[in-house]
Image (tube, rainbow, N blue to C red):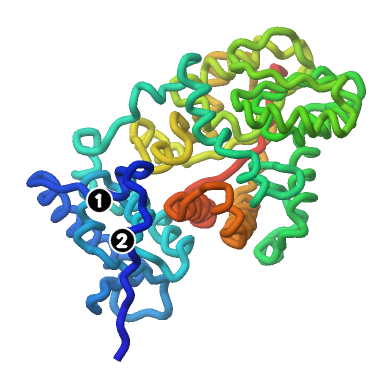
Amino acid sequence: MSTTVVPSQAEVDPAVWPGIAGVPSGPRNRIAATVAEKIFATAVNTLELRVIYDDGTILGKPGGGPRPEMRIHRPADFYARLGDNGLIGLGESYMAKDWTASDLTDVIEVFAARAAHLVPVPLQKLRGLYLPKPPRRERNSTANTRSNISRHYDLSNDLFALFLDSTMSYSSALFDATGKDLLQVEWGALAAAQQRKIDRLLDQVNVRQGTRLLEIGTGWGELALRAAARGATVVSVTLSSEQKELAEQRIREAGYADRVQVELKDYRLVEGQYDAVVSVEMIEAVGYEFWAVYFQTIDRLLAPGGRVAVQAITLPHERMMATRRTYTWIHKYIFPGGFIPSVRAIEDVTDRYTSLRVRERLSMGDHYAQTLRLWEERFLARHEEVAALGFDETFERMWQFYLCYSRAGFQAGYLDVQQLVFDRRP
């Protein structure tokens, strides 16, 4: 006779994680939980997924071969969270150990592949009435943006160093592989793939000796370093004090302090003229209502004959429009104030508000899936070091959910990442 050990919630600190330590309750929540259970069961019965309760109950389409398994340990808590906050509750219930998975990415990928169809259409039209809206304090105004950025990027340079490669690049790499070979890339290939991504961006905007380059979003300095090595002078702006500190240290150690200036500054406040502008996965933090300002700022700063390269995570346009006013688990726990654009939205904004035009696009979604796989493997392997930095188990489960949630989106094709090149040619 076998028994199932239900994961404990005892380690969840209510002072740090009040929304995880506590479970929604009350008459309204009981109704919402009942509805959520019915929607979830109906959806699961259309998916290539097996859901197993600890009492042996199984949900899922009959028949078929092996499928990812989701095991629900505390169904009452799971549906209470799901009913209270929709997909935010799905992530929170994982953080609380209400459910576990045979392979977390595989389970989330099943949901991601059918994201537009999981909730019945009539209820989708009512999402604005029952789902939380983005709080105004997370709107990416000049007053709020630094706080939004700090909540993620100022967590700890040491934390990011545990799972990033030696380039400290926190964006999609570009591997020297395609198709099935891409699925086999290993940790040792990541640093070179990150540099390949950066070099392609610099090539596309003709960065060379004497180029005046503006980088919007410093990261930890790798792009500025590689541009300086080509002889460019670089102004790089960030709102993360932690990133600025480490980027400047790396730049000094490489001997390029005379060529690179890192400023703690909102992109909207930058002045000057630049031959090239590069921004890697920063537009996602700009916010839907500020995209026009973002590109107008770039347009204003770009010298005649200059070029722009933007690496951007993207959504299909229809999903972007359907979710643009939705508050998600990613907003609440990972990237407050963020929003992912579509390629169409970028082209529409630049056509309408600027003289910039998209001249080239490279899709790299499969490469991001493998980048995230390597980060996840590295992060999970450094459990003791993460704990030694003061991050508890709930944080680790949150971070694992974030990495797997993101990878699942790219594997399912729900997300993509693009390198877009702009100029002003008629």
User: Is 375 above or below relative to 3?
Assistant: above
Please, which residue is most extreme toward the left here? 27
Quadrant of residue 79 within the rendered picture: bottom left
Task: Please tell me which residue is depicted at 41% across the width and 74% down the height of the picture.
Answer: 67
Tag 1: amino acid = Arg
- Marks 1 and 2 sit apart, C-alpha to C-alpha, by 10 Å
Outermost bottom residue: 1
| Residue 254 coordinates in the image, percent (x, y) | 87, 33
Residue 258 position within the rendered picture, expressed as x and y whole percent measured from the top left:
87, 19
Residue 32 at x, y = what percent? 15, 48
Verify CB contact (< 8 Å) between mark 1 and mark 2: yes
SS for callout 1: helix
The residue where tag 2 is placed is: 98
Q: Quadrant of residue 229?
A: top right
Answer left or right for 77 relative to 331. Answer: left
Could you say which is closer to the camera, residue 77 or residue 204? Answer: 77
Instruction: Write the residue at 85% across / 23% down.
Output: 257
